[in-house]
Image: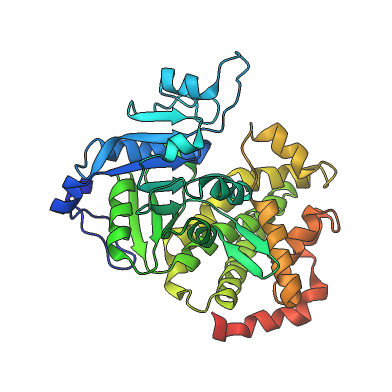
Amino acid sequence: MAPSAESQQLPVEGETASDNITHHEVLHKSRVTVVGSGNWGSVAAKLIASNTLKLTSFHDEVRMWVFEETLPSGEKLSEVINRTNENVKYLPGIKLGKNVVAEPDLERAVRDANLLVFVTPHQFMEGICKRLVGKIREDAEAISLIKGMEVKMEGPCMISTLISEQLGINCCVLMGANIANEIAVEKFSEATVGYRQNREMAEKWVRLFYTPYFMVSAVQDVEGVELCGTLKNVVAIAAGFVDGLEMGNNTKAAIMRIGLREMKAFSKLLFSSVKDSTFFESCGVADLITTCLGGRNRKCAEAFAKNGGKRSFDELEAEMLQGQKLQGVSTAKEVYQVLSHRGWLELFPLFTTVHEICTGHLPPSAIVEYSEHMPKFSLLEGSAQFC
């Protein structure tokens, strides 16, 4: 029988969860707001809400910011969530917890909250942060569950860094082998919290998310954890191409191995602080495996390949994802921009090829036909000093 969240000790690197509630925390209860209400955002709210009811260091209520939509019935999505306790569009059939309150006004949603959980498509985060400047508590702390990065003229910017710089607050990350619909029905899963210096804050995030079916560990490697969660979606696109072309399990395994190697090399070239051990956490190899076997990126890429690349990813996203966003294609573009700017394209043939297939410059079959890159491919093998 799994121990309760109250009885846990925060792991040292790579172990599991925790609770060491202080007298100060009891007197100053934390208020939580989840910024985002899609499939994963709704599951995150469910996880958190189950714990805020049990842990004395948190206020019971969990606010969830909802990007307001009008349903076919004519009702507002936020009103239906509050009436039924269910996100009928993005997580139908799952009760979120009666202490989850949907709020369509972003400023009202974050008011008085000192724990902000960001879980929206990464392409919307810069706009959200701009709206929140000056609207949050000075002592607020954040955690990002967002896969992706912003590419600016000066280089790539991780979402956790964007949050920290624009809002002036510390930001941890949570990534892992987390297909939301499976966690929603309480199937066993793991996740990794990445933190910089504040171990006490990491411990608090672990307590907030940990349940007997959702095991959470913490590692001191924000960039490593976040890049794993970001880059695996590019590899999942490649895996989907393999599935769509019915190339078989051997090919898919090879693509996953090459993808993991490129994930590791790219991460360490960008951030020398990234730890090798991070790739063996849930956020690393486990997330890569589950995303390449299931998940929306693999699913849409499979359909793209089956159609010979003749139907756009935008079209497939609209048809297959019911309003959810496809992250892998936009991330592949962002990675490509970084590689091109830094002269690294030939070092990363898989990442490069995925983008060129997504943009129609190569056919899906090119995922295993980049032999023209092979002489340079050895350079990646030779970048062991970065791995």
Residue drawn at x 25%, y 35% as measured from the top left? 53
| Extreme residue toward the front, this view | 134
Q: Nearer the viewer, residue 284 or 239?
A: 284
Residue 9 position within the rendered picture, expressed as x and y whole percent measured from the top left: 21, 58
Residue 172 position within the rendered picture, expressed as x and y whole percent measured from the top left: 42, 59
| Extreme residue toward the left, this view | 23
211 to the left or right of 345 = left
38 to the left or right of 155 = left
In the depicted structure, whether residue 193 falls above or below residue 99? below
72 to the left or right of 3 = right
Q: Dividing the image into 4 quarters, which one contains the C terminus?
A: bottom right
Residue 265 position within the rendered picture, expressed as x and y whole percent measured from the top left: 59, 75
Q: Quadrant of residue 354?
A: bottom right
Residue 136 position within the rendered picture, expressed as x and y whole percent measured from the top left: 43, 47
Q: Nearer the viewer, residue 349 or 24?
A: 24
In the depicted structure, whether residue 353 falls above or below residue 107? below
Question: Could you tell me how many numbered marks the image carries?
Answer: 0
Residue drawn at x 71%, y 77% as measured from the top left? 347
One can see residue 341 in this view: yes
One can see residue 42 in this view: no
Residue drawn at x 59%, y 56% as measured from the top left? 148
